[in-house]
């Protein structure tokens, strides 16, 4: 079988398009590269959506954490402690085992039905856990940045008659983002790497559609040869990490465009599993 | 455990629970918390040693040694750690068996035959006749090695940065006193770097705690393994039938980890205050003023 044929069969295998049956013996290098690359779609999907949703949630949480009102501050602090203080791996298991206890055919919430069976699927369930998890980590970063916004800038905004929402949107938030960005870049890469946990933590791979590491471990399980598939995953992730760093670098330069020379090069200072 | 537990089906709620929570499998579950703590206790110093060696190598004046040190620290950047956790144990296991098979078996027989990795019985690790605990120790040892390699690279990053953060004047002053490079390292560089390394190392410790459930992926019977085993629903053929209780077991594990991280955070705050004493930093100066 030619490599082009393999690409056609397995290129989108991870999202259920193409040949359904996975090869079981005599994996060619091409098959391994294509299958693992197709799995990477899932990693990108999880990372992109949970980062986007987590970003919004984190901004809210960080603001709540700065609030003088205990009614707002305490829940935010509790949420951040819960998700930063426990392993993501356990959070996946906990979420999954809670969801499977819910009634199978959904919970009627008046306006709509909570689709409980969908929650136990990786594409939604794992996405929710990842979103909550990254929201907690990002909120901690954003909170630190909000605390670091120079007092002079806020006073200057006051002097110009900016207050409330306008002051936050035009002065405080852009500066906080600028300060938080290097740490947030780290968090984004970290989350991207954490997406490899999804199919190893109770979430079943529906019709053997999994992420890059899922296919790699499938291949290793069949061939007992870890020296091809795992380095391939590693290579894919190094490339994707470089791309992600470049993407965040563009945003970093834009956030710092009024301060020539201050946009420091972003470096991934790795942290590990959460 | 208790005498009244001999016939569980006759028990009422509280005694039933007391008996249920003291079955042999539950005792294994409690013991597996010890496994996690043991992993932490062994991995932390081993990883620190790996990291220290790599950081010293990266600072070396001998180019190849410096490259190896830097490559090792760069390696974990960009590659998800789980890849290492899955790769290292199987790769090391096959590597050792391959080496042994070259020495102990007929070298003309290839170890890779189609989809199989085959070595003769004499080269097997551990030997198939070995006691079960030998197999357990071997698997646990491979897990520790995987953790130490990954966390060693992270620790190397931290320590390399900390060594560069030690004020250069201090090292020059030591040289001016006529100390040899080894003495400068031992007497000035290494004692002085800890205060700079502590924030990074404490972050690493928190991450290490939160990485321990991955033992489950390495086939160790750890707390996640037992939570799934014990929590799964048990039909009436079991002595203690119950529904799907995995949620409650995972809640216990969650609380365990929250407690671990909360306690660690307290200890680290104290330690950092202790290490800042006498340092030429803002924190050190502030303490000097109070003393």
Image (tube, coloured by chain):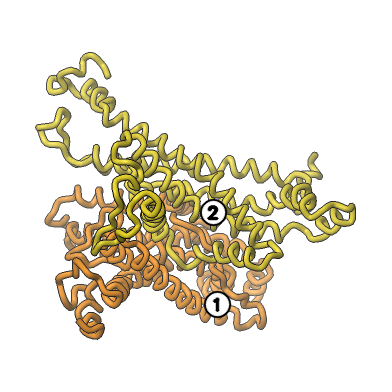
Chain colours: A orange, B yellow
Parent chain of label 2: B
Q: Which mark is residue A252?
A: 1
* Label 2 packing within 10 angstroms: few (<14), some (14-19), many (20+): many
Q: Residue at x 52, y 74 (%)?
A: A169
Q: For marks 1 and 2, give the one nearer the viewer.
A: 2
Q: Residue furthest top?
A: B3
Q: Is residue B131 left or right of residue A260?
A: left
Relative depth, front residue between A17 and A164: A17
- Pick whichever, B22 or B85, lies toward us: B85
Under circle 1, the secondary element is: helix
Q: Residues within 10 Å of mark 1 (few under 14, many from 20)?
A: many
Quarter in which the C terminus of chain B is drawn: top right
Identify the residue shown where x is 46% and y is 37%.
B38
Q: Quadrant of residue B39?
A: top left
Q: Which residue is mark 2?
A: B152
Quadrant in the picture for the N terminus of chain B = top left
Q: Compared to B165, does A261 lie above or below? A: below
Above or below A179: residue A110: above
Residue B129 rendering spot, x and y as whole percentages: 29, 37
Would residue A234 be seen by someone viewing this image from the given angle?
Answer: yes
Residue found at the very far left of the displayed protein:
B237
| Chain for disc number 1 | A
Mark 2 secondary-structure assignment: helix
Q: Position of residue A178 (x, y in %)?
A: 57, 73
**Residue at image coords 57%, 41%:** B266
Marks 1/2: CA distance? 30 Å
Q: Residue at x 49, y 44 (%)?
A: B261
């Amino acid at each position: 079988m030619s490599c082009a044929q393999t690409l056609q069969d397995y290129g989108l295998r991870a999202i259920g398009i193409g040949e359904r049956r996975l090869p079981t013996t005599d994996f060619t290098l091409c098959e391994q590269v294509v299958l693992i690359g197709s799995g990477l779609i899932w990693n990108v999907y999880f990372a992109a959506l949970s980062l986007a949703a987590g970003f919004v949630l984190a901004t809210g949480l960080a603001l709540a954490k700065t609030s003088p009102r205990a009614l707002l501050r305490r829940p935010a602090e509790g949420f951040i402690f819960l998700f930063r203080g426990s392993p993501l791996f356990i959070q996946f298991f906990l979420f999954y085992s809670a969801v499977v206890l819910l009634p199978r055919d959904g919970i009627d919430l008046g306006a709509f039905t909570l689709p409980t069976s969908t929650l136990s699927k990786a594409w939604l369930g794992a996405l929710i856990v990842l979103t909550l998890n990254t929201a907690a980590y990002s909120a901690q970063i954003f909170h630190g940045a909000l605390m670091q916004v120079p007092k002079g800038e806020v006073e200057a905004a006051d002097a110009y008659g900016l207050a409330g929402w306008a002051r936050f949107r035009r002065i405080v938030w852009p500066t906080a983002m600028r300060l938080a960005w290097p740490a947030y870049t780290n968090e984004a890469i970290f989350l991207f790497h954490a997406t490899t946990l999804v199919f190893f933590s109770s979430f079943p791979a529906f019709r053997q559609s999994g992420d890059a590491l899922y296919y790699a471990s499938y291949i290793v399980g069949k061939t007992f040869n870890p020296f091809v598939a795992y380095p391939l995953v590693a290579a894919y992730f190094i490339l994707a990490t470089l791309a992600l760093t470049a993407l965040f670098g563009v945003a970093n330069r834009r956030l710092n465009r009024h301060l020539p020379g201050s946009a420091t090069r972003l470096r991934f200072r790795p942290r590990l599993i959460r | 455990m208790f005498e009244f537990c001999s016939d569980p089906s006759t028990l009422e709620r509280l005694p039933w629970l007391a008996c249920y929570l003291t079955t042999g499998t539950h005792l294994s579950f409690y013991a597996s918390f010890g496994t996690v703590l043991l992993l932490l206790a062994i991995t932390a110093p081993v990883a620190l040693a790996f990291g220290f060696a790599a950081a010293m190598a990266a600072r070396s004046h001998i180019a190849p040694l410096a490259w190896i040190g830097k490559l090792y620290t760069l390696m974990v950047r960009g590659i998800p750690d789980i890849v290492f956790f899955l790769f290292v144990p199987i790769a090391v296991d096959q590597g050792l068996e391959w080496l042994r098979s070259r020495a102990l078996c007929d070298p003309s027989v290839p170890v890779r035959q189609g989809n199989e990795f085959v070595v003769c019985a004499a080269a097997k690790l551990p030997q198939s006749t070995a006691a079960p605990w030998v197999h357990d120790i071997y698997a646990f040892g491979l897990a520790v090695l995987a953790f130490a390699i990954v966390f060693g690279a992270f620790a190397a990053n931290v320590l390399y940065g900390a060594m560069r953060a030690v004020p250069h004047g201090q090292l020059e002053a030591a040289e001016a006193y006529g100390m040899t490079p080894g003495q400068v390292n031992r007497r000035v560089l290494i004692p002085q770097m800890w205060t700079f390394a502590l924030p990074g190392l404490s972050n690493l410790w928190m991450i290490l705690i939160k990485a321990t459930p991955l033992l489950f992926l390495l086939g160790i019977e750890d707390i996640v393994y037992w939570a799934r085993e014990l929590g799964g629903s048990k039909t009436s053929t079991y002595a203690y039938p119950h529904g799907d209780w995995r949620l409650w077991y995972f809640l216990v594990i969650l609380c365990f980890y929250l407690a671990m991280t909360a306690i660690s955070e307290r200890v680290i705050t104290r330690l950092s205050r202790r290490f800042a004493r006498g340092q030429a930093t803002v924190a050190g100066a502030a303490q000097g003023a109070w003393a």
